[in-house]
Structure formats: C-alpha cells, structure tokens
Image (spheres, grey):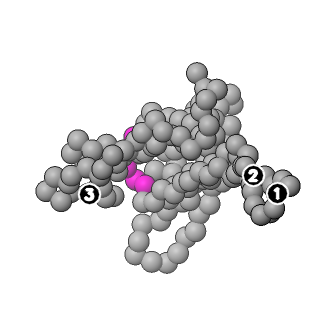
Amino acid sequence: MADSVLINGAMHSWSSTSFKLGGEKYTGITSIGYGDKRTRTKAYGLNRSYGAVGRTGGKYEVDSLKIKAYKATAQTIRAQLAALSDDGVSYGNAEVPATLQFIEGTDVITVEFERCAMIADASTTDEKPDPLTDDLEFDVMKVRRNGLVLFDATGES
C-alpha cells in the first residue's frame, strides 16, 4: 500500500485537528500528547549461537493522554467530568472516551482513546502576554488508530 496523493499539497496540521472528550468537542486546547507500546521480551534457550529462540506476546502499555488547555476550557472539562461522577464534584472518578481526528479533505485519521480517567491536573501561572493554560493528564486503557491496534486483538469481540 502506497502513500496517498496530496491534493493541492495539503497535509494534516493543527488546523486539521478535532478533539472530543466524552462526546463534547473542545477547541481551547493547545497541545495533545499520547502513545502506546507493546513490551516484548526475547526468550533464550540452549543453542550454539546464544541467540533468541522466540519472543513473548508482550505487555501492552498506554502512555498518559496529556492535554494543555486554556484555563476556561480546562474548567469546562472538569465540570463535565464532575457531572458524570456519583457525587457531582469528583472529576477524577469519571471514565469517558476521547477521540482525536485529523481531517484534511477526504483523508481522515481517527485516534480513539478508551476509558479515559483524569489522573493529574497541573497549573503554572507566569507573567507573560500568553493566555494561561492548565495541564490535564488522563489514564487510558487502549488506543485505536483508524481501528488498528498495537496490542493482540485476537480475543476481542
């Protein structure tokens, strides 16, 4: 499979980006970071070369979803999550899906984050002309990129 042809040279950029958390679209976000990995270990046995004879299926691990948002957007996210909790104030208890899309013409890349729960909330206030932001961090169970996954999905229904 080859790369797609660019229409008028248009490539995905920040202006192509759309982010939803729990079904709500947010535009006051200035940075999004994420990742996942599958840690696989080589298995060694008795052989002349001392080389590996195989590898394990691995352990799937998801990095935190890190979002930098303007103060008002961060507060709206907190309120959205708190409303989903049993007591109405504990925004760290809610679990929601998140969707990140990169849309440029008909070329759409969709990244889905399953079962996001906020685990960190940080702020720094500096004397500068830039708008103030908060750093929000979410624990994520799985990441899907256009439906494709890094982990072994054999047992999934």
Residue at the extreme right? 46
Structural distance between the alpha carbons of marks 1 and 3: 50 Å
Q: In which image quadrant can residue 42 be found?
A: bottom right
Where residue 152 appears, as percent x and y from the top left, is: 62, 37
Residue at the extreme bottom? 127
Could you say which is closer to the camera, residue 50 or residue 118?
50
Name which residue type carries label 3.
Answer: Met
Callout 3: helix, strand or loop? Answer: loop
Of the numbered discs in the image, which one, if any, rests on residue 11? Answer: 3
Mark 2 or mark 1, which is nearer the start of the sequence?
A: 1
Residue under the point 33% across and 58% down: 14
Badge 2 local density, few (<14 within 10 Å), some, or many (20+)?
Answer: few
Residue under the point 36% across and 44% down: 109
Q: In which image quadrant can residue 83 be found?
A: top right
Q: Which residue is mark 1?
A: 47
Mark 3 or mark 1, which is nearer the start of the sequence?
A: 3
Please give the range of residues in magenta: 25-29
